[in-house]
Image: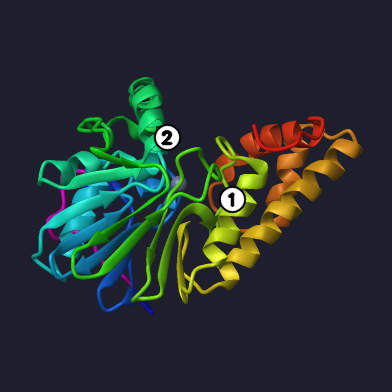
Amino acid sequence: MSSVALTGGAGASANTTRMSQLKETRVRDNVWVWSFHGDGPAASYGANCVAVVADAGVVLVDVLFSPSHARQVEAALRQKTDRPIRVVVLTHHHADHTWGAVHFVRQGALVVSHRACRDRMASDHPSQLLARRAQAEAADLLADVVLVLPSLTLDHGIGLHLGEEVEVWHPGHGHTPGDVFVYLPEAGVAVCGDLVFHGFHFNYQDADREGVRRGLEALRSLDAEVFVPGHGPPGGPELLGQQLAYHDAVEDVVRQGLAEGKGEAQVTADLRARFPGYGLESVLPVTYARVREWLLRPARGGRL
Ligand SMILES: [Zn+2]
């Protein structure tokens, strides 16, 4: 695995100057990961875009927060191959993984997701996009977003056969109701979506308490050597154990805080201290609210 920082520029848009630096990681000869340094909107919150370059075309997994980000990734991809982008797989509905899609749809790419991912994109994104465009930090970046919905949905799993086997699996409601991960059995690579964060806080906004753990079990059952998280650098199977330990530690911190009568500000400060240097600190108030709700809710015989 090798990682380099790319200088901005090639094929870049007018927005390039405000965007952070693109980072490129090669995990296999035909599998690449791109992300932007940092974790605000200009950096697409540090989300990863993965390219699988197969004989019959390119499969992209997650396409970042805006067409501007997507254009920069495409410029980097075009340094590797001129093969067409056939398929875009969305691991879940969150905007930092989906709003760049229109750039690739215009080139004829087929967008694939779980059915519940498509449902949430259809119900949530129009009002979210309006709200985010009203915020100065994201307004220019989102000016040319056109919302597009997946054309192909799955309920359990599908295989793509473009010269490299690409499996797309739904492990149940984990990070969001419409999670999928991507598995490349020949390459031994799993693209985890936001079931796994690495060096970033987990976003529990739409998560299921038991489902996030079941998702990690499903990933662990794969015969993969490389795991690409939704945010942060790729690694080995140790990323799964680290994510599980994170979930347990977050519950411990919130439980302890509640026992000591602490409120949101104090608990989020405790979480920052427990995970120094982690990105996406902006999600911690949601973490406090969701985990508090889980801990205070009477035990149920299954997930909601
Ligand atoms: Zn994300």
Label 2 residue near ligand 1, CB within 8 Å: no
Q: Please tell me whether residue 113 belongs to the stretch shown in magenta.
A: no
Magenta segment: 4-15
Instruction: Name the kind of residue labelled 1 in the image.
Output: His
Instruction: Name the kind of residue labelled 2 in the image.
Output: Ala
Quick one: label 1, few (<14), some, or many (20+) residues within 10 Å? many
The residue that label 1 is drawn on is: 201
Q: Secondary structure at mark 2?
A: helix
Judge whether residue 48 can be spotted in this image. no
What secondary structure characterizes most of the magenta part? loop
Tally the marks: 2
Horizontal arrangement in the rendering, residue 212 relative to residue 160 (left or right):
right
Locate residue 160: give its quadrant: bottom left
Q: Residue at x 71, y 41 (%)?
A: 268
- Marks 1 and 2, Cα distance to the nearest angstrom? 24 Å
Q: Residue at x 20, y 39 (%)?
A: 102
Which circle marks residue 116 in the picture? 2
Horizontal arrangement in the rendering, residue 268 relative to residue 96 (left or right):
right
Q: Residue at x 84, y 41 (%)?
A: 257
The mark nearer the N terminus, 1 or 2, is: 2
**134 or 153: which is nearer to us?**
153
Q: Secondary structure at mark 1?
A: loop
Judge whether residue 242 can be spotted in this image. yes
Quick one: label 2, few (<14), some, or many (20+) residues within 10 Å? some
